[in-house]
Image (tube, grey):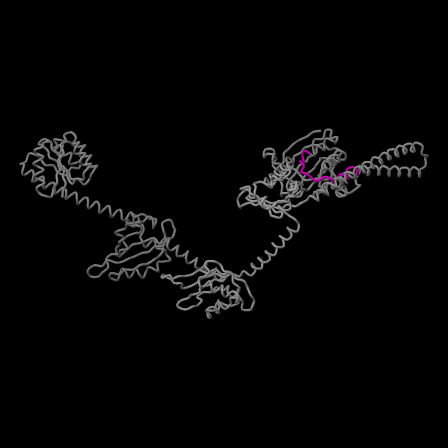
C-alpha cells in the first residue's frame, strides 16, 4: 500500500483526485489544505509520496521542500503547477522534488500521468533507500568487523580490503590498495618459510583453502600474531584467478597460550621442587597414582615409581592408629577440603607427622573419579607446638608462683582485661574487675593517676623507649599496694596508632618499704657524715692555725723545715679529701631523672667566674637520663676551662647523633690537654686543683651508662665528648622544627 499526502486548495478537485487514486486499491490518500497542515502530517505520518500544489505553497514552496527533505529523504515529491509557475517548479526540482506535472493537461490524462509518476517515484525512492541501507549495512559491518577481509589477484595485487586494517597492521587501507606496502611485506621474516607451501598451493590447486597462524611486523615495529583463513576462486576451467581471505589478530590469544604454557611449566617446576608431596590418585577405571611429586622420596623415603607400582602404598604407610581417620576422609565422613593430620611411617620405620589437604575431582555426572592433594611434613611444627605448649604451662606456673598480673588493653575501644590472679591478689573477684567499666583505673591512687596518664602519653608519643610506671592501687580491704606496670604497644603495618597495649603488673610494695627504709638509713648516715665532716674540718682549721703559728717560730733548720712542709701537705690533702666526700656521698642516692642539657649548663655557668668568655649552647631540646648531680659534671668542665685554658674566649656545647647514640661535645678555644694526660685526667687525685673534679664527673655519668673522653688537639683547645646510650636521651616535643639547627639543635649564646 502506497500512502500519499495531497496538498490542494480546492476541496472538490481534491476529492476527485482522491477517488481516482484510491480506486486502484494500492494507494491511500490523506488531504491537507495548507502548508502548515501538510508539515504537521508529514511529521506525524511516514508517507511514501506527497503531491503538492505550487499555488497553495506560493512563496513557501522552497522552504517547504527543504523542511520535508530534512524530515524524510525517502518521500517522493510531485509538484502540480499552473502555467507560468515553471521557474518555481524548476527551482523545486533542483532542491529535491522528483517530478513536476502541469495542471493544464486534460484532467483524465493528468490523473493517469500523476498515478504513473507516483508509482515511478515511489519505486525509485524504494530502490535508492534499499541501496542506501545495503551500503549502510556493508559499511557498518566492516566498521565493526574485528578482522581484515581481502581479495587479491594471484600475483598478490589487492583488489579489495576492508575491516580493522589500521588496528591490526598499523598501516592504512590506502597504503595497501595503492601498493605502498603488500600483505606479504608485513609477514615476519621468521615465518616466510612457514607460509611458502600454502602460498604455492592456493595459486595452483583449484578450490584450495586452508588456515594458518603466523606473525606480522606492524608499522611501529611491534610483532603481532594473526590467524589467516584463505581460499581461491577458480574460473570455469579450474584455474585460480583470485585469492580471498580473512585475517584476525590473535596476539592476545597467543599471549594467553604462552602464559598458560609458562604457568604449566612453573607449576611443573614447583611440583618437582616444592618440599610438599603433590599427588593425583584416580579411582576409575582403576585405582592408581597418576602423579606423585619427587618430594615423596624426601618425606616418606619411597620413590614416586614405588607409588605408581603399588596403588595401596599411600594407605599402607599411614600409622595403624590413624587408619580409621584416613578411611573417614575417603568415605566422605570428613570434608575433603579440611586439612587432616596423620602419622605416617617412613620407609626406614621412623614415624612422622603429616598434614594432608585433599580436593575431590568429579566427572560430568557428579561421580567422584579422582583425588588431588598435598601432603606436608609437619613433624617439626608438631614438636614446636608441643614445646610451645610446655613453655606456656611453664610460664603460667611461673606467673602464678611469682604473683604477676597480666593486663591487655584494646586501644581502639578502651576495653582492658586483667588475669584472674591479679584481681584475687588485690582481694577482688574476676567478675568485679570485668563488671564495671574503668574499674581497675578507679583503684589507682588519686595522687598517681595523672602521672600514670602522663607516662602512658610520653610512651605513645615516642618520648620514652619503653612503658614503665610505678603507682599505688587500693585493695578491697582498703590497704594500698605499690605496683610496677611494664608494657609495650602493638601496631598494625602502616598505622601510626597502636591497636593494642599489653604488659605485666608486679607487686613492689615490699621493695618500696625496703627503699623507704634504705632512704631513712641514708639520711641518718648522711647526717652522721655531715656532723663528722664538720667536726673534722673544724679540727683541721685549728690545726692549720697552729701550723701558721709554728711556721713563724720554727727554727731555721732545713730538715725540720722539710718535716713541717710534709705535715702541712698531709693536712691539706686530708682537708681536700674530706671536702670531696661532701659531693661523693650524694652520688647515686637519688634516682636518675630526665634533665635538659642546655638548662643544666646555663645553671652550672652561674657558679663559674666566666668574665668575658662567650658560652654558646646548641643542644636545643636534648634531654638525658642522668643522676641529679649532673650539674657537677658541667660545673667541673666549665671550671677547668676557665682555670686552665689560659686564653679561653669561647666555650661551645653542642650535640650530634652517632649511630644510635647521642654525643655531647664540650669544646673551648684554650690551650687544650697534652696527649699523655688525656686518660690520666679522669683518674682519682690527678689534677692541678683537688684532683677529684673529672674523676667525679666520670663517676656521675657512669651511673646511667654514659662515658666521657677528651678528644681535643693540644694548642687548639679542649674537647670533651660525653656519649649517651640510645635509651638515655630524647628530644622535648615542645621544641619545634624552627627552633632546631641542621643537626637537630637550637642555638643559644650566653655571655657571663
Residue 587 lies in magenta, yes or no? yes
Side (left or right) of 540 relative to 37:
right
Query: In the figure, 707 relative to 353: above or below?
Result: above
Where residue 344 appears, as percent x and y from the top left, is: 53, 65
Total label count? 0
| Image quadrant where residue 688 sits | top right
x and y, in percent, of residue 1 in the image? 13, 43
Image quadrant where residue 28 sits: top left
Please state which of residues 531 and 415 is positioned toward the viewer in this rendering. 415
| Residue 688 appears in view | no
User: Which residue is nearer to you in this view: 684 or 463?
Assistant: 463
Rendered view: 9 above or below 354:
above
Q: Residue furthest bottom?
A: 309
Residue at 28 percent of width and 61 percent of height: 201
From this viewpoint, is residue 494 visible? Answer: yes
Range of magenta residues: 580-599
Q: Residue at x 45, y 67 (%)?
A: 289
* Residue 303 lies within the magenta run: no
Q: In this view, does 746 lie to the left or right of 715?
A: left
Picture coordinates of residue 204, whole percent (x, y)? 26, 61
Figure check: 499 above or below 212: above
Corner quadrant of residue 20: top left
In the displayed structure image, the side of residue 280 where residue 26 appears, left or right: left
Question: Horizontally, is 578 left or right of 701 in the view?
Answer: right
Instruction: Say which of 461 and 397 sits in front.
Output: 397
x, y percent for residue 509: 69, 43
Q: Tell me the quadrant of the picture where the C terminus can be found.
A: top right
Q: Residue shown at 94%/35% (left/top)?
A: 556
Amino acid at each position: 500500500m502506497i500512502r500519499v499526502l495531497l496538498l490542494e486548495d480546492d476541496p472538490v478537485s481534491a476529492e476527485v483526485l482522491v477517488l481516482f487514486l484510491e480506486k486502484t486499491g494500492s494507494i491511500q490518500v490523506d488531504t491537507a489544505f495548507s502548508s502548515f497542515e501538510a508539515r504537521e502530517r508529514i511529521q506525524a505520518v511516514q508517507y511514501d509520496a506527497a503531491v503538492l500544489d505550487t499555488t497553495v505553497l506560493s512563496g513557501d514552496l522552497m522552504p517547504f521542500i527543504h523542511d520535508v527533505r530534512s524530515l524524510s529523504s525517502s518521500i517522493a515529491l510531485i509538484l502540480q503547477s499552473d502555467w507560468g509557475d515553471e521557474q518555481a517548479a524548476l527551482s523545486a526540482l533542483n532542491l529535491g522534488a522528483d517530478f513536476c506535472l502541469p495542471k493544464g493537461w486534460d484532467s483524465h490524462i493528468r490523473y493517469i500521468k500523476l498515478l504513473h509518476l507516483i508509482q515511478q517515484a515511489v519505486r525509485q525512492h524504494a530502490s535508492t533507500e534499499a541501496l542506501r541501507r545495503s551500503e549502510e549495512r556493508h559499511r557498518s559491518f566492516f566498521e565493526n568487523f574485528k578482522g581484515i577481509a581481502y581479495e587479491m589477484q594471484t600475483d598478490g595485487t589487492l583488489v579489495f580490503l576492508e575491516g580493522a586494517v589500521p588496528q591490526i597492521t598499523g598501516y592504512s587501507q590506502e597504503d595497501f590498495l595503492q601498493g605502498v606496502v603488500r600483505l606479504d611485506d608485513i609477514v615476519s621474516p621468521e615465518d616466510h618459510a612457514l607460509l611458502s607451501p600454502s602460498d604455492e598451493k592456493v595459486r595452483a590447486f583449484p578450490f584450495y583453502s586452508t588456515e594458518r597462524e603466523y606473525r606480522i611486523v606492524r608499522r611501529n615495529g611491534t610483532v603481532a600474531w594473526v590467524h589467516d583463513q584463505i581460499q581461491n576462486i577458480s574460473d570455469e576451467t579450474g584455474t585460480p584467478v583470485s585469492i580471498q581471505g580473512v585475517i584476525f589478530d590473535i596476539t592476545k590469544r597467543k599471549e594467553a597460550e604462552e602464559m598458560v604454557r609458562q604457568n604449566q611449566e612453573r607449576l611443573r617446576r614447583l611440583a618437582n621442587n616444592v618440599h610438599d608431596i603433590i599427588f593425583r590418585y584416580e579411582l576409575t577405571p582403576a585405582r592408581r597414582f597418576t602423579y606423585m611429586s619427587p618430594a615423596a622420596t624426601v618425606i616418606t623415603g619411597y620413590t614416586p615409581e614405588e607409588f605408581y607400582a603399588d596403588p595401596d602404598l599411600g594407605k599402607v604407610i599411614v600409622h595403624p592408629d590413624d587408619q580409621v581417620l584416613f578411611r573417614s576422609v575417603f568415605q566422605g565422613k570428613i570434608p575433603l577440603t579440611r586439612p587432616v593430620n596423620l602419622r605416617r611411617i617412613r620407609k626406614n620405620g621412623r614415624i612422622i607427622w603429616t598434614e594432608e589437604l585433599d580436593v575431590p575431582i568429579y566427572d560430568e555426572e557428579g561421580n567422584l573419579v579422582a583425588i588431588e592433594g598435598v601432603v606436608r611434613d609437619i613433624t617439626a611444627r608438631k614438636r614446636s607446638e608441643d614445646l610451645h605448649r610446655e613453655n606456656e604451662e611453664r610460664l603460667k606456673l611461673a606467673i602464678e608462683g611469682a604473683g604477676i598480673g597480666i593486663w591487655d588493653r584494646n586501644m581502639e575501644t578502651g576495653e582492658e582485661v586483667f588475669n584472674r590472679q591479679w584481681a584475687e591478689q588485690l582481694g577482688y573477684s574476676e567478675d568485679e574487675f570485668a563488671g564495671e567499666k574503668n574499674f581497675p583505673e578507679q583503684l589507682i591512687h588519686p595522687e598517681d593517676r595523672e602521672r600514670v596518664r602522663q607516662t602512658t602519653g610520653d610512651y605513645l608519643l615516642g618520648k620514652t623507649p619503653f612503658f614503665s610506671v610505678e603507682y599505688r592501687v587500693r585493695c578491697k580491704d582498703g590497704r594500698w599496694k605499690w605496683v610496677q606496670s611494664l608494657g609495650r604497644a602493638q601496631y598494625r603495618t602502616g598505622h601510626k596508632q597502636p591497636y593494642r597495649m599489653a604488659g605485666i603488673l608486679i607487686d613492689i610494695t615490699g621493695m618500696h618499704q625496703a627503699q623507704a627504709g634504705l632512704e631513712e638509713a641514708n639520711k641518718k648516715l648522711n647526717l652522721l657524715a655531715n656532723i663528722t665532716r664538720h667536726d673534722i674540718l673544724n679540727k683541721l682549721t685549728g690545726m692549720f692555725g697552729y701550723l701558721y703559728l709554728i711556721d713563724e717560730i720554727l727554727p731555721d733548720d732545713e730538715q725540720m723545715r722539710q718535716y713541717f712542709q710534709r705535715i702541712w701537705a698531709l693536712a691539706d690533702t686530708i682537708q681536700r679529701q674530706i671536702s670531696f666526700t661532701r659531693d661523693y656521698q650524694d652520688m647515686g642516692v637519688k634516682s636518675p631523672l630526665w634533665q635538659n642539657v642546655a638548662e643544666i649548663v646555663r645553671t652550672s655557668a652561674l657558679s663559674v667566674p666566666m668574665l668575658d668568655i662567650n658560652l654558646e649552647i646548641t643542644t636545643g631540646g636534648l634531654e638525658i637520663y642522668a643522676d641529679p648531680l649532673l650539674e657537677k659534671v658541667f660545673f667541673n668542665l666549665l671550671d677547668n676551662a676557665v682555670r686552665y685554658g689560659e686564653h679561653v674566649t669561647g666555650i661551645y656545647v653542642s650535640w650530634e647523633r652517632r649511630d644510635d647514640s647521642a654525643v655531647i661535645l664540650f669544646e673551648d678555644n684554650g690551650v687544650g690537654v697534652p696527649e699523655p694526660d688525656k686518660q690520666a685526667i679522669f683518674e682519682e687525685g690527678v689534677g692541678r686543683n683537688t684532683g677529684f673534679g673529672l674523676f667525679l664527673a666520670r663517676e656521675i655519668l657512669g651511673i646511667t651508662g654514659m662515658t666521657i673522653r677528651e678528644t681535643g688537639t693540644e694548642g687548639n683547645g679542649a674537647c670533651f665528648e660525653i656519649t649517651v646510650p640510645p635509651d638515655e636521651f630524647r628530644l622535648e616535643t615542645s621544641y619545634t622544627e624552627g627552633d632546631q639547627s641542621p643537626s637537630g639543635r637550637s642555638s643559644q649564646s650566653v655571655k657571663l
